[in-house]
Amino acid sequence: MPGALTFLLTGCLLKGVLCVEFKVTLPLTVEVMRGSCVTIPCSFEIETRFNRDLDGTCEAIWKNANTNEVVFQSSESNKNKGELKGNLREKDCTTTLNTVSEHRNKRYYFRLECKNALKYNFNMASVGIAIIDNLPSPTLTPSTLNVKEGSSVSLTCSAPAICPSHPPTLRWTPKLGESQETLRENQDKTKVKTSVHTFTASHLHHGQKISCTAVYKKLDGRTNITPERSVTAFVSYSPKDTRVSVSPSGPVPENSNVTLTCSSDANPPVKNYTWYRADGDQEAFIGTGRVLNIEASKVKEPFFCKATNDLGVGRSSNKQIDVQYPPKNTTASVSPSGPVPENSNVTLTCSSDANPPVKNYTWYRADGDQEAFIGTGHVLNIEASKVKEPFFCKATNDLGVGRSSNKQIDVQYGMLLPVFITTVVILFPLVCVLLFLIRFQRNHNKSPPRGEIDTDAPAQHPIRGGNEVPNTTEDDIYVNTRELRQDGVTHPAIYSELDGTNLSSSGANNAEEVSKSSGKNGEDVIYSSVNWMPKSKKKRRQSLTDMDPSGGSYMEEEKRVAGRVCGNFVSDALEMGSLYQEVGPKNVRKEVECEYAQVQRRKKN
């Protein structure tokens, strides 16, 4: 409060000796908000001899210092005018007046009146009431805020309760944490509203104005008064919100200049900026500085930057430059990839690396320095032919054209000989097996019967001299053989095997008999008669009838070969060793069918 005036009332009862003292303590002036109440702090002292009179019958009265008009009396029940806040027995005369507008620019003094001898006007001291439209701002401590991110912060806001019955409401903007309010009383009997706001410092609070607003409600319904006090937070933190910007920001042509800028929010400021290219889980260093100039290429790996200060490091997200370039690495592929038969279906595929993507694919056949258009599309289906000119494709986008290398299709044609060879290779083993089975079956079925030497059988044919062969309708072959035989030696069985490759068909009923001597005197002569039966079954039966069935042993052999000549009797006879000495074919002629042979061994004369 402004300086208070203390008035002392003294009376001298004896020579220069103090005997009585009355004193009141009041503020010189009280400021009050228009439309609100006002509290006047007040305390007093009385002479000692009246202390027993200070009882419950005492009341506080406030009067106009100019007119002595009573403006407040505590004994009255009308509280619309005001209220005694102090306790008179404790010599506290603090009073709240509600009708402030009636007391504007006036001064008032206090009167103590009891229902006894104690009655006194403290008119030597008065208080003035000053009505103001703007109240002083709340008090905010600390007045400056400098903290590190993550630390706890407490702000205290205080505002006077001009009207204790209606203390102000304290509001924090922004509300960062929890608040706790209290209403405390000062030594001069005034009251103060206090709010403590507690929160955890964040980098988001850096540079932010934190305000405390006191909201005073007017009793007359007029607009509230809201004075405020604020403080700016200064928070230290590591780099945050690190990001990369590219200039120009849109698509850029390949090999053009590009400016990269790394930005980060940090306090204290960033000391170093470094640039890296992301390669999977690895990072490749490419430069330093907040701004980096590079040449745009079609390398697809993204890049990023790091910002560093005394408190830590911040990393940006990956950034990709949209580099545009004409088609590159244009290739043509063929499916199937190996040799293909003529007139078969072939799929051609054209591939290319381009940004923006390829718009058109066109196919051509190379003809010397010329090119013949054959189709369009990323995939082209054609029929393979034996045309030997190679083909290629072109890929086109907004920036240019890419051309593949020439591609040749290996077309196979004239396939008759390979097919024939393949067929022969497959069938040859089967034919061999079949022939083997046929031969085995034939050999099994044509085993010749063993002949026996019949010493009693007479000659079947008359002996003709001079080895002459009679002329008949059919050719006969007679073969004379002689065998030297000693007495007591058993004649071996005689076999005859026909070889159809050297003998021809025999005639009918022609025979030749030759007799020779096996010893010096012509003894032990063996006569052999070989009769070739005619082809006709009738003649064969006739010949068999003419032969003596009871004579010597016979060996018959029958063999049938289609498309070949009948046996080689001469070769077979020579292979029999010393059993035969001479074999003579007569009038041999190739025939298609086999004949029947009969061998008869005659008795020795």
Image (cartoon, rainbow, N blue to C red):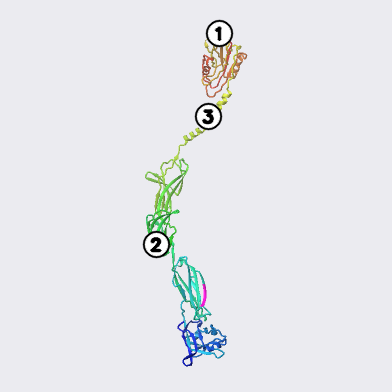
Foreground mark, 1 or 3, reads 1
Q: Position of residue 120 (x, y in %)?
A: 52, 90
In the rendered view, would you say 141 is above or below 36?
A: above
Left or right, 49 with reference to 307: right
Foreground mark, 2 or 1, reads 2
Between the C-alphas of marks 1 and 3, the distance is 54 Å
Q: Name the residue tied to disc 2.
A: 271
Q: How crowded is mark 1: few (under 14 residues within 10 Å), some or many (20 or more)?
A: some
Q: Position of residue 547 (x, y in %)?
A: 60, 14
| Amino acid beneath label 2 | Lys
> Which disc is residue 500 wearing?
none
Q: Name the residue tied to disc 3.
A: 432
In the rendered view, would you say 11 is above or below 554?
A: below
Q: What stretch is highlighted in magenta?
A: 180-184
| Amino acid beneath label 1 | Glu
Q: Name the residue tied to disc 1.
A: 523
181 is within the stretch colored magenta = yes
Number of marks: 3
For mark 2, give the secondary structure.
loop
3 or 2: tag closer to the N-terminus: 2
Q: Do the residues labelled 3 and 2 touch (CB within 8 Å)?
A: no
Between the C-alphas of marks 2 and 1, the distance is 143 Å
